[in-house]
Every structure is written in C-alpha cells, then in structure tokens.
Amino acid sequence: MPIFFRWLLRLGPSNPIAVRLVQNASRRTKHLYVRSAYLAVLILVLLWTMLGNTSSGAVSYRELASSGATSFAWIAYLQVALICILAPVFMAGAIAQEANPKTWDILLTTPMSRLEIVLGNLLGRLFFVLALLFASLPLFALTQFFGGVPGSSIIASYLVAAGAAVIVGALAISLSVSRLVGQRAVFTFYISVVSYLAITIAIDAWLRLRGLGAGVNGSGVTWITAFNPFLALRSLLSPTAYPAVTAGSYSGLKAMILERPALAWNLGSLSLSTFLVLASTLTVRSGGLRQIAGQRTTKRPWYRKMLGLPGVGEEHRAPRTVWANPIAWREAASRNATFGRIVARWSFIGLGILVAIAIVVLFHTGVINLKDYQFIIRSVVFTEVFEIALVGVNMAATAISGEREDGTLDLILTTPITPGMYLAGKLRGLVSYLLPLISIPIFTVGIAGLYSLVGGLGNPAASFTHTLPGGGTVTVPAVLPEAGLLAAVVLIPFIAFCVMIGLHWSLKSKGTLSSVIGTVAVVGIASGILGLCGWASGSDMPTIGPALVTLSPASLLDATIVPVTRLQETVDSGRGGLNAARIAMAIGSVLAAAIYIGIVYGVRSALTRNFDFTVRKLAGSS
C-alpha cells in the first residue's frame, strides 16, 4: 500500500487511539443506556406530537401531513439539542481518561504525531455521536409516511445536526488538549455553548422585533441565523414564518448567510472545526510537557500579591482562618484559590453589575423602549441563572466523586469528621461560593424593580396602562418592584437544591462524568417540568396560577418582568387583579423556598444515613 494511503489510514480508521476508544467504549453498558435513552426520547416525542396534533376519529390526509410535519420539526429540534448535550460528554471524555490515570505522559512518549493524537481522540469519540444520528434515521424516515416531510428536509436537518456535532467535538477536544483538564473542559464547554446559544437567539429575536430581519415584516432570517444551529434549522423547517432573503438579492458571503443560512452554518462549522484541530496540534505536546515538567518559577507577580496568592511553585502560603466546619471552608476557599478562578468569578460579577446598570440607564434615556427593556432583562437574567445552575451542578457533581478518584476521600474518612458534618460542609461551602454569583441576577431584576418603585425618576415609560377586558384600566410597572426580593427568596434555595442533587449523584456514582450526566438529567427534567407547569398555570389559572409560577425560578422571573403576559387570567379578573397576583406570588415564593429547603434536608438526611454503606460499596471502584 502506498505510504500516503497508510498515512491517511493512521489519521482515521486505523488510528490506534480511535480504534482503542471505539473498541473499549462499545463494550460499556453506560453507552448502551445513553444510546437507548436517546432513541427512547425521540420516539416518545414523536408519538406525543403525532397524537397531540391529530383529532380522534377519521383523520384527513391534509391533517395527517400537517401533523407529520409538526412532529418532524419537534424531533429535529430535539435532536440538535441532545447532540449539544451528549456530544461534549462523549468527546471531551477521551482526553479526560488519559489525564486521570496519569497515562498522558506515556502517550506523549509514543511515536504518534501530534495530528494523530488529536484526530484519534476526535474521530474515536465522534464515531459515537454520528452513530446516534444514524440510529435515528429510520425514525425520521418514518415521518415521510404521513406526508408533509420532504426527503431533502430530513437530509438538511441531519447536516445541521452533524455540523453541530463536529464543532462541539472539535471545541471540546481543543479545550482538553490545550488545558489538559478533562472534566473542567466539559464544564467549560457547557457554559460557553449555553451562553453562545442564548446570546445569539436573543440577538436574533431582538433584531426581528425591530423589523431588521428578512421578509415583508422583517421577522425572518437575520445576520445571526447562520451562526446558530437552532436558527439555521428553523430557516429550513419554517420558511414561511422565518423566511430567508430572496435568492439573487446579494452576492458572495453575504448571499450565503442571508439566503442559505443552513448551508452557511454547515460550511462555517466545518471550517472552524478544521482550524481548531490544526490549532490543537500545535499545543498538544507542549501543553502535555508543561503539565509533566511543571512550572518551576517562584517569582510572585504583582497581581498574585494583590489577590493574596503565593507565587507559582511556592510551597508556603500565608496562614488563614478556618471555619468551624473545615469541609465547608475547604470547599469555599479551594474553589477560589487560583488566579484564573478568581478572575473568572469576579469578571462575571463585575460584568453582570455593569450590564444591569447599563440596561436601566439606556431605558431611562430613551435609547431602548419598554418592549426591548423587558426583553433584554429577561434574556440576561435567564442566561445568568442557567449558567449559575450549571456551575453549581458541575461543582457538586464532582465534589465527592473527584475526591474518591484522587484518594482524598479515604484520607478525610480517617479524621473525626462525621458523615453529617462532611455533607453539610460540602453543601454550605458550595452555596457560600455561589452566593456572589447568585446575587447578580437578583441585582439585575432588583435594580429594575427599584427603578419602577421610584417612578422611573420621572420617566413615564417606567409604567404603562393595561386595559381590562371587562372595562377599566390598571397601571402596571415595567418590572414589579418586589422582583429582586422574590428572586432571592426562591433562587437561593433552588441553587441549594441543584447542589444537593449534585452531591447525591457524586456520592453514588463511580466517576465524575457519570455523576455530572445524572445530575444534569435530574435537575434538567425537574426544572423543565416545574417551569412548563408554572408558565401554563400562571396565564390560565386565576389566583392560584401566580402562586404556582414561583415553583421555578425561570417562570417566577418571567412573571415579575412581564406580569400582564404571564399572569393574564389573574390580572384581567377585575379590580385588584394585579395586586392579588402579586400577593399570591409572594406567598408562593415562600412556599416554593420551603419546598426546596425540605427536599435539600431530606436528601441530605438520606445520604447521611447511607453514607458509610455507599462509600464502602464503591471503595476501590474508581
């Protein structure tokens, strides 16, 4: 065989790393469960949408075709979302497994080239993601029996999902290779991709609200569409509601982005993935050697002195006061013990404060109108809460399983620290670390509510008049004055709930990756169900609806920012409707906080009782 073809085979099918990953992971029961759950979710969603969009009795071909098209759209969006969730778990775990058992230094001593190391990890994990896509192909093809779903749409949706998988994998591998942190790379990716998707979707919606998109009403494709897989998929599945620019209106790159955003997304993701792979080849060996050799410099830069950090490589650090519970102090202090973490944490806090003040100032000066003001606040707060929840979930899910893997838990169990003290310390330390982050969304809605409380400092747009259906009007503030207080009452116990669920899975899981997956699944399902119930009941049920809204922080924040839309049935019920809704939300917030606190206490008590049994059961299983 020619040398060139042998070189190509070593980069792909016969790459030793790719072959090892595929052979080993294919035998794991966990991956079988993931693939089965993936298909089960798609099948259930397809059945649910088909039954929910068709009437009982005889069904016309037109109705069946419409139901098939709607069902296809649902599972197409769901598939892209699942790919974004599962791909980093499959992808970044490759180098995480090389780093944890200390086999990275052995890998760097092999004659494999840098490109072979990167592509082996990328293709070995990408195989499982592509297997998920191909496994669902018969399900997508089934929708064609109902009509309304052309084959080209199925192929195009798969290309969009594949583009998302490739860019997700390349980015995760790039983070892992350059930083040599497996689980942290997964978490960093989650935070980055969630922020990116939320920001691009929000910008796209804001542009369309201002009529800056394509179409007659300006509610179609925007410049952002081609940079988001969900928006690119929407341009394919909803060409009427989300139209693209008429073909031939532009030329070059501009034409591709505005006229064919799905194609632009696919080509852009492939190009960016290629760039990330090439960049990773430049850092894979240098990053690994730095990790092995270590940084021996002991010089203490000025910025580390300002933050009270020792110099890199120093063995001595200034003594610090330990809390009554050393586990709580260790969790809160160690999470904030490096320069990068300190900068990231306070950058989030500082940027959040500046953004909150800037939004109010722009609204007060008339730069943005009331509709944009409420929309921006909702987008910012939702993104912040989602990121904080992910931070808490990741830290809690790795708090115990990580200590089990590196042997720290065995040392802690030899001390007089009891299981109750250990779990309570974990919970208190993580929540204490997250409190400054939690204060940012609370501050954002709080300053907006305070602005409404003082009458907008003379700005008439700080409130508006809503006409009731039965006659009469009611004055509604742009943001409810008590929004910050209600957010604090519910959000802090909710984050404690996320942390406690993470600790539960961290204690009962063998590894950090499985504990992160389990925690994300439980918290995501619970939050999703409560959020959907809150959104539906708030607008459809009088009086009791506003109380149920508070079960989810997302629905509560939404109701305090746009009360007329989310609490419509109660607000339109008559005189005092808005005040009744506000009182119901206040009572519901206290009850929701009590429910979350009760769950946290119950889970912690159960873990404390079974702590010794669980630890002994998993001893030596890492």
Image (spheres, grey):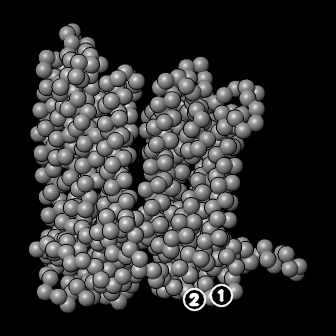
Relative to 77, does residue 244 appear above or below in the rendering?
above
Report if residue 575 is visible in the image.
yes
Quadrant in the rendering for residue 221? top right
At a point 21% along the width and 12% down the height, the residue shown is 473
Quadrant in the rendering for residue 397? bottom left
Q: Position of residue 610 (x, y in %)?
A: 19, 78
Circles 1 and 2: CB atoms closer than 8 Å: yes
Q: Position of residue 446 (x, y in %)?
A: 22, 38
Query: What mark, if any, has residue 300 been given in the picture?
Result: none
Q: Please tell me how crowded label 2 is: few (under 14), some (14-19), or many (20+) other residues with Cα within 10 Å.
A: few
- SS at mark 1 in the image: loop
At a point 22% along the width and 27% down the height, the residue shown is 452
For the residue pair 211 and 229, the one nearer the viewer reads as 211
Report if residue 464 is visible in the image.
no
Quarter of the figure that contains the C terminus: bottom left
At a point 21% along the width and 67% down the height, the residue shown is 429
Query: What mark, if any, has residue 106 been given in the picture?
Result: 2
Residue denoted by label 1: 110
For the residue pair 380 and 162, the one nearer the viewer reads as 380
User: Spatial distance from mark 1 to mark 2, Cα to Cα?
Assistant: 7 Å
Farthest top residue? 471
Kind of residue sitting beneath label 1: Thr
Q: Please tell me how crowded label 1 is: few (under 14), some (14-19), or many (20+) other residues with Cα within 10 Å.
A: few
Q: Is residue 439 left or right of residue 381?
A: left
Kind of residue sitting beneath label 2: Ile
Q: Position of residue 542 (x, y in %)?
A: 19, 28
Number of numbered tags placed on the structure image: 2
At a point 13% along the width and 20% down the height, the residue shown is 576
Relative to 578, does residue 191 appear above or below in the rendering?
below
- SS at mark 2 in the image: helix
